[in-house]
Amino acid sequence: MTQMKASISEVMETMFFYPVELKEELGLEESGLFQAENKVIIAAIDFSGPLNGRIFLMIPEDVLGLMAENLMGLETEKISTALVTGTAQEALNMIAGNAFSKTPFDVPVDLGVPEIITALPDKGLDQILMVETMDGMMALGCDI
Amino acid sequence: MSFSILLVDDSLPMRSVLKKTFKAAGYSTSDFFEAANGQEALEVLKNNWIDIVLTDFTMPVMDGLKLLQEMKKDDLFREIPVVVITTEGNQKRVDSFFENGAAGYIKKPFTPEQVRDIIISIMGESDEGEDFDDSDEGLDF
C-alpha cells in the first residue's frame, strides 16, 4: 500500500492536475462515499505475478467528470459517458502500474485490462485507502 | 511539419490526451489515425502511410509488444519508429521493448514535455513547436 499511496498522488497531480490528500484514518463507510446522492463509478483491474489480486478505484461520477475535463482539456458538454468511464479505467491503470513499478520485484507484475463493475465484492476489501480531492472523496481498494 | 501518426491504445481518453499533446507540441496539421489494439493497428498500417506509431503495452486482442514484433517482421513496416507508452516500469520488460526494436519508451504518468522530447528526438523539431515551453496552453492537457 505504500507504493499505492505514492502512486495515486503522482498520477492525480501529473495527469489530472488534481491535488489529493490521503485520509488513512478514514474507513469506507464513515467516508460517506457511497451515500445515496453519490453515483459512484467503480473500476477494477486484476494483477498477477509475484503478487495476485485485484485493485478497485471508486470515484463519484461528478468528480470523475472533472477529472476527465482536466485530463483531456475538453469542455463539459464534450465529455461523453464513454470518456468518463474510460477516464476511471485509465486512472486505475496508471495508479496500479505506477505503484507496481515502484516495487522491488525482479519479475514483472502483469496487469489485466481495467473494467467498470457495478458493485464491490460482498466480502468487502482487504485494504482500503480514502483519498480526499477538492471536489469530494474517492477510494482505492485492494484484494490480495 | 506534419506527420501521419498512429495512436494505439484501448483507452479512448488516452488517445485523446496524446492527440492533444501532439498538437500542443506543434504537430497541429498532422493526420491522426487511431486503433484500440495491435490487430487494429496492423490493419491501419496496411491501408495508410504512417510516419510514427505510439502504442500502449497492455491491450486486449493484441498487446503492444506483439504489435512491435509483427511490425519488425514486415518489410513495409519495420522502419516505422514505434514508441511504447505504458505504466510498465519493470526494467526487464522495458529492455524487452528496445530488444524488439522500439524507438522510444514513455512511462505513464507523463508530462507533455516528456512526450514532446521523445517525439522530437525521433522525428525532429516541429516548425510550430519551438515555443512549446513558453505556452501555457501547451502545458495544459
Image (cartoon, coloured by chain):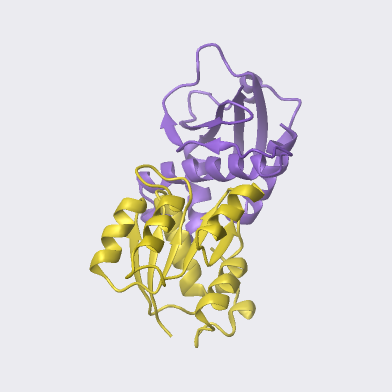
What residue lies at 61% left-to-right and 35% top-to-bottom? A137
Residue A46 point in image, percent of width and height: 51, 30
Question: Residue B15 vs residue B88: left or right?
Answer: left
Question: Residue B61 vs residue B132: left or right?
Answer: left
Quarter where residue B6 is shown: bottom left
Quarter where residue B40 is shown: bottom left
Q: Nearer the viewer, residue A5 or A45?
A: A45
- Is residue B104 positioned above or below A78 on the image? below
**What residue occupies the far left of the structure in this picture?**
B47
Q: Nearer the viewer, residue A52 or A74?
A: A52
Q: Nearer the viewer, residue B1 or A132?
A: B1
- Is residue B118 positioned above or below A25 on the image? below
What residue lies at 64% left-to-right and 18% top-to-bottom? A126
What residue lies at 61% left-to-right and 69% top-to-bottom? B113
- Is residue B91 positioned above or below A49 on the image? below
Residue B10 point in image, percent of width and height: 39, 48
- Is residue B36 positioned above or below A56 on the image? below
Q: Which chain is purple?
A: A
Residue A57 point in image, percent of width and height: 55, 33
What residue lies at 50% left-to-right and 84% top-to-bottom? B126
Q: Which chain is yellow?
A: B
Residue A143 point in image, percent of width and height: 59, 22
